[in-house]
Amino acid sequence: MAPLRTLLVYGSESGNARRAAQKLAASWAAKGSSVKVDADAICGNDAAKKFDSLKEDYDVLVILTSSFGEGEAPSNYDKFLLALAKGAKAESPPLRGVQHAVLGFGDSSYETFQNCPRLSDKLLEGCGSRRVHTRLEVDASASWSADAEESAAAQRAEEEWKDSVCPRDEGPAPLTPSLRVERRPEG
Ligand SMILES: Cc1cc2nc3c(=O)[nH]c(=O)nc-3n(C[C@H](O)[C@H](O)[C@H](O)COP(=O)(O)O)c2cc1C
């Protein structure tokens, strides 16, 4: 079976999503399985430059992005968001056959909480990509007010998301638990 080629794309204004994406890309690439992860995460604007060939070059896109301004895309990601918006309107879906998952960074004190990650997830689907994991939304505000237990739970949720999205030989973990049919030995 051909290895799953995976690219991590980030949109980040103050570095949170970028650092998380770079760390994740390096650690997944180091796993050295038959999955092929690009060890360097790239920003959305660089991904936009090769938007038309993404579906030929990759099987899985993992997107980590924040929202800035009033729910806008970070400045190193807006071109990717624009390409997604155009692609979602195109006659031939430009990301058909690709799978994706989105990890969003935001702050619920803003009315436009998680605008850019939510829009990205929706537009990726509009471009024909298949969402293989539900989006996780990291809330900076929650981490200020959380007690130790809540912080640990949020941290755990993030680690679990990363672990289940981590591409495996057989593909990312399914979006919803699938029914497992156990075969009993015959006779
Ligand atoms: C000026 C400013 C505007 C922001 N606007 C939003 C917003 O509209 N929606 C949201 O969910 N978070 C917003 N945030 C919170 C950031 O998305 C959050 O801090 C995130 O962790 C930043 O990630 P980054 O460092 O990767 O850019 C804003 C933060 C700042 C400082």
Image: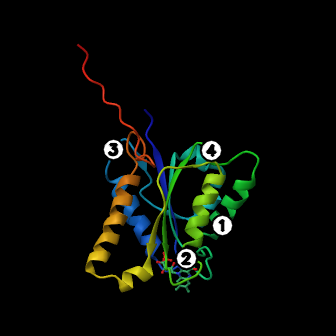
Question: Mark 2 and mark 3: span between their CA atoms?
Answer: 36 Å
Q: Is residue 6 above or below residue 12?
A: above
Q: How far from the left and from the top, in percent, is residue 57?
A: 55, 46
Above-or-below relation of 39 to 153: above
Instruction: Characterize the local packing of mark 4: few (<14), some (14-19) or many (20 or more) Cα atoms within 10 angstroms.
Output: some
Q: CA distance from mark 3 to mark 1?
A: 32 Å
Which residue, given by chain and number where applicable, does mark 1 sit on?
Answer: 79
Residue at which label 4 appears = 96
Q: Residue at x 35, y 31 (%)?
A: 181
Q: Are discs 1 and 2 less than 8 Å apart at CB?
A: no
Foreground of the two, 78 or 156: 156
Camera-nearest label, 2 or 4: 2
| Among numbered discs 3 and 1, the one appearing first in the sequence | 3
Q: CA distance from mark 3 to mark 4?
A: 25 Å
Q: Secondary structure at mark 3?
A: loop
Q: Nearer the viewer, mark 1 or mark 2?
A: 2
- Spatial CA distance of label 1 from label 2 is 20 Å
Residue occupied by mark 3: 33
